[in-house]
Each structure stands twice: as structure tokens, then as C-alpha cells.
Amino acid sequence: MKRIEWVLVFLPFFLSWTIDRLLKLWAVNLNRHLEFGFVNFALVYNPGAIFGLFSELPPLLRVVSLSTAGIFIFCIYILLQYLMPFKSLILRGGMSLLIGGILGNVADRVLYGHVIDYIFFRFGTWSTPVFNFADGIQWLGYGMIVLSLFREGGVFWPENNSRNKYWINLPFQLKYCFFLLGVGLGISLIVSVFSYTYLRVTLLDVAGNNQNILNRYLSPFLFTFLLITFGIALSLFSVGKIISHRIAGPLFAFERYLRQLLENQDVRSIHTFRLRAFDEFKQLETLAHQIKKRLEKDCPEHYSNKQVDSDVSSDPSKIPLEHSRHLKG
């Protein structure tokens, strides 16, 4: 990925989020129903997700969980942009549009506790649910992702250098995965103790020792936090699996390449050592090339001396004159 390509990848995210904020600033001042053919504008405050989903949940659980889920998805988006082993600007751009739309609605929930919807389509007596620009741009992102998967599904791994197994070195990779998992769970534990005790002390200070109020707020908080922690743990384990594969994979491939060089008499027939674009230890390619060149250079003399040693062991009288001085030394 070149620098201009990274700009093209992240530009849709910033543009979609900015346009969504500007349109919502216009929509909050919309005091009447506007109609332009089948396109209609009307201000609606949506307490749920897209098309009003999850609006029946308790307010605390709904706002906190949907907002946090949006930020969690944003973190996954950043990790995917870093970990994807192929370019695919269509896929990356679609992900940027999708996340830009999601964060546009997350900003509404954080700032207002609800999402600002203002547009719907009407065809005769039938009309669509009221939505906003962020919702529409999310569907465009979904479409680009599906399109890229159909068109570019074969570019995930190079055909001539694929490693189909993710568990190359199981002890090392599991150790790496559980280390990341432990770090993530440790941070989650610290955050959970701080946030739970802060919320509980605040409720006791405001409402007193009212068990009904405590259960009303603390139970949804714990449920949401445990759900988010499970998602983080699963993501960290998966990320550890991918990153450890990028470490163990090149070492495994390099070891296998060295064995081929040692076991094959015709070094020139061995293919050039290549790693995947996102693998670690890319310097092993240069080292493998230098080793192969050195063996190709020394190969005739090496096998000639090997043949001489074999002849000497069977019959010393077969020693060629040009090798007698070397053997005596």
C-alpha cells in the first residue's frame, strides 16, 4: 500500500462522517414535513439502531451498549485495515464507508442519547422507515464489501506461496495468543472495577440505598460489560493467531527452504524463496537468495571433492594428482 492509497482508503470514512454531521445539524432545525416527489424529509428521534431496531431495550442498556459496540467495531476496522494481506481498495473503501456511517450514529447516541433521522421515501401508500445519511452510506459500504468479495476473492493468498494452515508452530502461537488474551482481560478487569464502583457509589450518593434503582442500572451495566469483554477476548485471540502466524510462518518456510538446499544436489532447480507481502522477517528473502547464490557458486567444487573423498576411501591409488597435495596436507 502506497501513501496515496492509504489516503484513498481513509478519505471515505472522514467524508461520510463529516457529511452526516452537517446534514443532521440541518435536520434538527427542520420544523415541518418537506416533500420532493417520492423523497420526503421529516425530523424523527430514533432511540434504537438502524430502522429503529433495539428501541425497546431499557435506555441505559440501549445507549451504552449500542455506543460501545460502535467503538468496538471501529477498533476491529482499524485492525482489519492493518492485518489484511491484500490491497483491494474496493473492500477497504467499503469498510471505511460502513464505519463512517456507524460512527455517525454513535456520535448521536453519545451526544443526545438518540439518533437523528430525517429522510424517507414514499411510493403511493407505501413508505420506507425514516433513516439518515449514515444509514444509507452503511448500505453502500455493505455493497462494496460484497462486490469485492465476489470479484477479488482469489487474492487473499498468492497461489504459488500459500500456507493453508494457521497453526504452524502450535506451542509458540498459543503462547502468543494467550499472552494477548491475558493482557486484554487484565485491562478489562481494571476498567470494570473502576466503572462499576464509580457507578455504584454515584447511585448510592444520588438515590440512597435503594435496591430497585441499583438493580435497574447495575444489572444492565454488568451484562453489557461482560458481553463486550467476551467480544474483546475473542478478537484478541484471533489477532494473536494471525500475527503469530505471520511470525511462525516465515520461520517455518525458511527452515523448509534450507532443508531443500541441503538435501538437493541440484541447487539451481530449487525455486526462489518468497514470503507473503504482510509476513514478518522479510529480510529472510535476501538471506535465502545469498545462500543459494553461494551454494550455486561452490556447488561444482563441492561435489567434485565429495567424489574424490569417496574414491580415496575405496582405493587410494585413484587419487588424482591435482588433489594429492591437498589430501596430504
Image (tube, grey):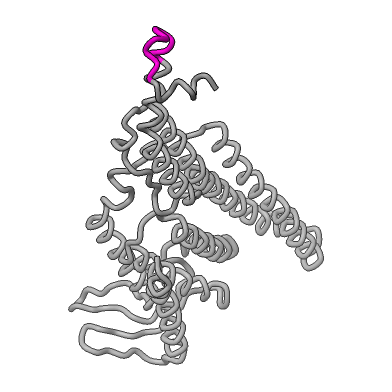
Q: Which residues are magenta?
A: 310-320
Q: Residue 119 appears at what percent x and percent y?
A: 34, 81
Q: Residue 254 appears at what percent x and percent y?
A: 45, 39
Q: Quadrant of the C terminus?
A: top right
Residue 154 or residue 206, whichever sits in front: 154
In percent of the image, x 53 and y 64: which residue is there? 71
Which residue is the extreme one toward the left?
Answer: 124
Residue 281 or residue 133, whichever sits in front: 281
In the rendered view, would you say 174 is above or below 140? above
> 146 left or right of 1?
left
Residue 142 or residue 49, whichever sits in front: 142
Quarter occupied by residue 130: bottom left
Residue 144 or residue 26, whichever sits in front: 144
Q: Is residue 167 magenta?
A: no
Which residue is the extreme one toward the top?
Answer: 314
In percent of the image, x 38 and y 81: which residue is there? 118
In the rendered view, would you say 166 is above or below 211? above
> 19 left or right of 196?
left
In percent of the image, x 79 and y 61: which residue is there? 201
In percent of the image, x 29 and y 43: which residue is there? 160
